[in-house]
Image (cartoon, rainbow, N blue to C red):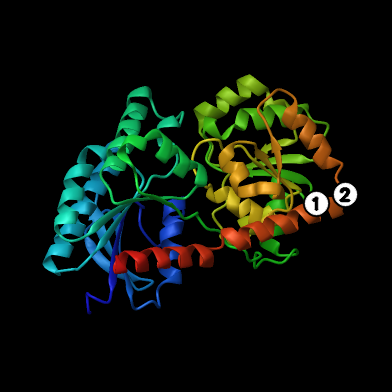
Amino acid sequence: MNNTKTQHIFIVGSKGIPGNYGGYETFVDKLTEYHRDKAEIKYHVACKARESGEFEYNNARCFKIKVPDIGPAQAIYYDVHALRSCIKYIEENHIENPIVYILACRIGPYAKGFYKKIRKLGGKLYINPDGHEWMRAKWPAPVRKYWKKSEQLMTKSCDLLVCDSVNIEKYINETYASYKPNTTFIAYGAETRRSKLSDDDPKLNDWYREKKLEPKGYYLVVGRFVPENNYETMIREFMKSKSDKSFALITNVDDKFLQTLKEKTGFDKDPRVKFVGTVYDKELLAKIRENAYAYFHGHEVGGTNPSLLEALGSTDLNLLLGVGFNREVGEDAALYWSKDEGDLAALIDKADAMTPEEIAELGQKAKKRIADAYSWQFIADEYERLWDKSRKS
């Protein structure tokens, strides 16, 4: 391999590929898929594993990092050891002008040291800061304090911050203005194709029968079962609405949080509210999204959210919490609600009264929005330009 012609990209911070379906994992999977025939790009992807080793996937060199079961500290251990592995490989193989791309700001206290080593080897350190991890309610106060400090330290010690949201880029530049951070915006991506399942597929109809749902007869939400995704507001407001449709929640239920919601909302007394478990079959999930009457999106922490992009790419009518992150993505292709009492309930009643033509028009706008600015092809092309620019600079 001619190192002067090939741009080597070392990606650290995802759980690895293939077979993991989180946001970062899907991103790395798609990036390597769309670039697998690009001779001038060579990816090296860290994979969290139970054992060491290497394998090829999408023409990327995937290297396993053995991570012990040490609880929440696993993520920091993983990133640190993955970076050490990257540096060792760069040194031993005399890689010229490598880019090390870290996903998320977990290792702030170590950032300066790694940055110096990578620069000494003629490389560059890029970071994707993710969303506001330090704002997530699931973390206890000391952990949130660590995430915030870690973000600050990593912002200080890198060559470029690649933000997947305009609002995150603005936040980084305003919050850390004294560091004069170098930033760019490249969004997260989504598929724009329809599900391969037909309307009469037995798998789909069996699922509907089991969950007591029917096509276009349910509002839908898909996402992590955490307080900052505003499940309480969505359930409470749906219960206040006059809708005769169901509210299907596809999520991995946490018993403690579920009990809290039950006590606060009494949703168990409303047969319309249905927790239907998780769906890991991608084609089935895509079809369930397509057949939803409308989609709720209550996320208010983080950058460009994968489940929002998937909803806009497949569901015609989307009701989004009106925060900057969501408005930036949805623009005029969605309807918006606030957490004010009665606001979402009124919007649900309004949505129920919309004509098929009005819903179809919003659906067309949503698909166009995704195709124009968030398709994986578009995102992959943006990254190719970034790597090319780095190679020439």
Residue 57 appears left or right of 284: left
Left or right: 150 as drawn, with respect to 382: left
Residue 266 percent across, percent down from the top left: 68, 23
Query: Is there any visible trace of residue 280 in the rendered image?
Result: yes
Q: Hey, which quadrant is residue 236 in on the image?
A: top right
The 10 Å Cα crowd at callout 1, few under 14, some 14 to 19, many 20 or more, is some
Q: Amino acid at mark 2?
A: Thr
Would residue 156 be found to the left or right of residue 270 on screen?
left
Q: Residue 209: x percent and y percent?
A: 73, 51
Above or below for 230 versus 296 = above
- Can residue 61 be seen here? The reply is no
Which residue: 23% across, 53% down? 82
Marks 2 and 1, how far apart at CA: 6 Å
Indicate the amino acid at tag 1. Answer: Ile
Kindly indicate whether the residue at mark 1 contacts the one at mark 2 (C-beta within 8 angstroms). yes
Quarter the N terminus occupies:
bottom left
Residue 290 location, x and y as percent? 70, 56
Q: Quadrant of residue 12?
A: bottom left
Q: Position of residue 191 (x, y in %)?
A: 58, 62
Q: Which residue is mark 1?
A: 359
Q: Which residue is mark 2?
A: 355
Viewer-proximal residue, 15 or 297? 297
Residue 34 vertical position relative to residue 114 in the rendered view, above or below:
below
Crowd rating for badge 2 (residues with CA inside 10 Å; few <14, some 14–19, many 20+) = few
Foreground residue among 65 and 270: 65
Which element is circle 2 on? loop
- Left/right of residue 379 with respect to residue 100 in the rendered view: right
Question: Height in image: 244 above or below 182?
Answer: above
Q: Residue at x 75, y 63 (%)?
A: 199
